[in-house]
Image (cartoon, coloured by chain):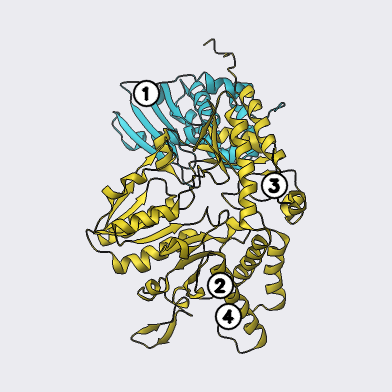
């Protein structure tokens, strides 16, 4: 087994919940643990410069504004955006996608227009489009999902795209199978077929893989801080500046206006037009600390480490009788996610039994019900990794499964049948 | 995984060998319940009888799709409630809910040995819904049955809410 370039035992000490726990935390696609530095940044804001942003004329308000806007620059650099004004803070990925559906969709979609998404989307990249389609009369078309390749049938794009297509939205990495979509390639194909705007759901990609929105040339990118060591309640919508300027606000209130009279208001400049009310300042500064942490390690080193863990998990679980794996056969096309079922055992029972072995995984449909239907299952057990997970933890997971199989081995009925 | 307090042999037995599995056709009451959190699903069919002036459950069958806890609980429920009057069934449902949701200290009835094994689910709050799915579904079914004064084929649907 090749060793990873990360010094894992040292890194684990940076995370209070990892350092002092016997728990094998393998639920990172749901949310990641937070390092001391992120928790300290949030605390430091509240203890030393807690003030509102964009309005105070005193020192700590200036500091708060600088910290808040400084993180916007860090976010832009992290995703390769040329302009921090294209970075909007939201609550999470879901809100970022809803913002586009509301503020862009309500203005630019008309009856008969088409939105193309894939069957492999998280519900948060399906439901907002269904809602805005219902309101505007737009139509949703799906790129079907193939269980053979664990990815969308991208070859069907020419059939699905055309002059009516106004938006194409898809994920970089799928959350239940870990499938990595070749985003740059797909975007290039879309651009040959239509002038549609392109939204990438980066919730599972940005924390694990190198992302550069300029190289991709996508119009929108949505992701969440809490899946990349940051706090909950902070997400990002990146959008091209030119598109943002055509969009009306998402929510009305303070901080998003220039002038308000009794009759009407004029909108603030971007990106503040889309950040109504007092934002999650503490969350933003803590997110900045998370980005610092990730930059210190390097996203490439993180991905290589996750690749080793994924490969090992696929080998160990793949060698077991009575365990079904879902997704691509090889670790190459995956991003730190392994979905499986112990045959004859409901994933919720698997999850509860693993919890008693101090192994935390996610069970259920993972907000991917269309995929589950394609596989003909109700759900899966899902292990997902991040930079602090170890080979020993993957081995613990594998060692626990035969115990579940033994427990669920047929028992003699006391009922005589 | 020894000394198991939830996945005990009695629960795994009911899961693997469900009692009263299937459908009663024709039936007097049909109820459908789902738990959207885990996709668990149950269909109950009941044949009514009379005990003096009281309705009673002459026969009850289930078709369940779900985890070991929800399926075992459904199997045990049918065994326990067969032959019971509506009032007795409602008391039994109340007792189960009280035991699992309110930590009731009432003793388990002597002939409820199998059901008492479900008490282990209290340590896993998110799984209590699994254990109660069949019971809550029957509650809705009985309510519907009683709202319709004339006996006949009645269908009811129940959805657990988060």
Residue A410 locus on image (x, y percent): 58, 17
Q: Which residue is mark 2?
A: A72
Closest to the camera, between mark 1 and mark 4, is 4
Q: Label 4 to label 2, Cα distance in Å?
A: 13 Å
The answer to which of marks 4 and 2 sits earlier in the sequence is 4
Picture layout, residue A94 above or below residue A76 = above
Quick check: A274 left or right of A34?
Answer: left
Which chain has been coloured cyan in this picture? B
Picture layout, residue A111 above or below residue B1 = below
Mark 3 secondary-structure assignment: loop
Residue B105 locus on image (x, y percent): 66, 36
User: Which of A99 and A7 lies nearest the eye of the viewer?
Assistant: A7
Q: Which residue is mark 4?
A: A53
Quarter of the image where one finds residue A74: bottom right
Question: Residue at point 44% right, 56% down?
Answer: A184
Q: Which residue is mark 3?
A: A4
Question: Residue at point 62% right, 46% down?
Answer: A306
Quick check: A11 left or right of B160?
Answer: right
Q: Are discs 3 and 1 less than 8 Å apart at CB? A: no
Q: Are discs 2 and 1 less than 8 Å apart at CB? A: no
Which chain has been coloured yellow in this picture? A
Q: Which residue is mark 1?
A: B48
Is the residue at mark 3 from the same chain as the one at mark 1? no
- Residue A363 visible, this angle: yes
User: Which of A41 and B78 lies nearest the eye of the viewer?
Assistant: A41
């Amino acid at each position: 087994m090749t060793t990873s370039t990360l010094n894992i035992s040292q890194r684990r000490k940076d995370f209070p919940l990892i350092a002092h726990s016997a728990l094998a935390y393998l639920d990172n696609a749901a949310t990641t643990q937070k390092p001391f530095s992120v928790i300290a940044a949030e605390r430091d804001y509240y203890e030393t410069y807690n003030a509102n942003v964009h309005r105070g004329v005193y020192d700590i308000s200036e500091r708060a504004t600088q910290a808040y806007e400084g993180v916007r620059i860090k976010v832009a650099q992290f995703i390769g955006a040329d302009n921090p004004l294209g970075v909007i803070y939201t609550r999470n990925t879901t809100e970022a996608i809803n913002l586009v559906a509301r503020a862009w969709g309500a203005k630019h979609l008309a009856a008969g227009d088409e939105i193309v998404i894939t069957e492999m989307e998280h519900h948060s990249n399906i439901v907002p489009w269904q809602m805005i389609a219902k309101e505007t009369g737009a139509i949703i078309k799906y790129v079907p999902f193939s269980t053979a390749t664990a990815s969308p049938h991208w070859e069907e794009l020419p059939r699905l795209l055309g002059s009516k297509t106004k938006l194409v939205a898809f994920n970089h990495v799928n959350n239940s199978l870990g499938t990595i979509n070749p985003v740059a390639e797909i975007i290039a194909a879309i651009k040959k077929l239509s002038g549609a705007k392109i939204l990438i759901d980066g919730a599972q990609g940005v924390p694990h893989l190198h992302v550069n929105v300029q190289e991709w040339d996508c119009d929108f990118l949505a992701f969440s801080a809490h899946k990349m060591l940051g706090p909950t309640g902070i997400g990002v919508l990146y959008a091209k500046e030119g598109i943002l300027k055509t969009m009306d606000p998402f929510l009305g209130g303070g901080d998003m206006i220039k002038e308000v009279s009794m009759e009407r208001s004029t909108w603030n400049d971007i990106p503040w037009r889309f950040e109504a009310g007092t934002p999650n300042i503490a969350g933003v500064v803590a997110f900045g600390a998370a980005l610092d942490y990730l930059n210190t390690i390097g996203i490439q080193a993180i991905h290589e480490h996750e690749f080793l863990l994924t490969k090992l998990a696929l080998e160990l679980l793949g060698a077991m009788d009575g365990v079904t794996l879902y997704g691509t056969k090889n670790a190459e096309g995956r991003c730190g996610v392994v979905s499986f079922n112990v045959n004859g055992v409901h994933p919720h029972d698997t999850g509860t039994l693993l919890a008693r072995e101090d192994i935390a995984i996610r069970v259920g449909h993972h907000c991917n019900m269309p995929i589950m239907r394609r596989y003909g299952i109700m759900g899966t057990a899902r292990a997902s990794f991040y930079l602090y997970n170890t080979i020993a933890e993957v081995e613990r997971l594998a060692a626990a499964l035969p115990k579940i199989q033994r427990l669920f081995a047929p028992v003699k009925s006391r009922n005589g049948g | 995984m020894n000394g198991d307090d939830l996945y005990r042999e009695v629960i795994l037995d009911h899961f693997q060998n469900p009692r009263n599995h299937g459908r009663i056709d024709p039936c007097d009451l049909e109820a459908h319940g789902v738990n959207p959190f885990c996709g668990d699903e149950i269909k109950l069919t009941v044949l009514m009888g009379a005990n003096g002036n009281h309705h009673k459950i002459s026969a009850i069958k289930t078709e369940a799709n779900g985890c070991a806890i929800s399926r075992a609980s459904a199997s045990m429920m049918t065994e326990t409630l067969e032959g019971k009057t509506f009032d007795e069934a409602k008391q039994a449902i109340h007792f189960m809910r009280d035991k699992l949701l309110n930590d009731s200290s009432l003793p388990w009835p002597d002939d409820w040995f199998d059901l008492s094994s479900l008490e282990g689910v209290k340590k896993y709050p998110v799984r209590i819904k699994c254990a109660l799915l069949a019971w809550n579904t029957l509650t809705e079914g009985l309510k519907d049955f009683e709202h319709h004064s004339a006996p006949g084929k009645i269908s009811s649907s129940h959805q657990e809410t988060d």
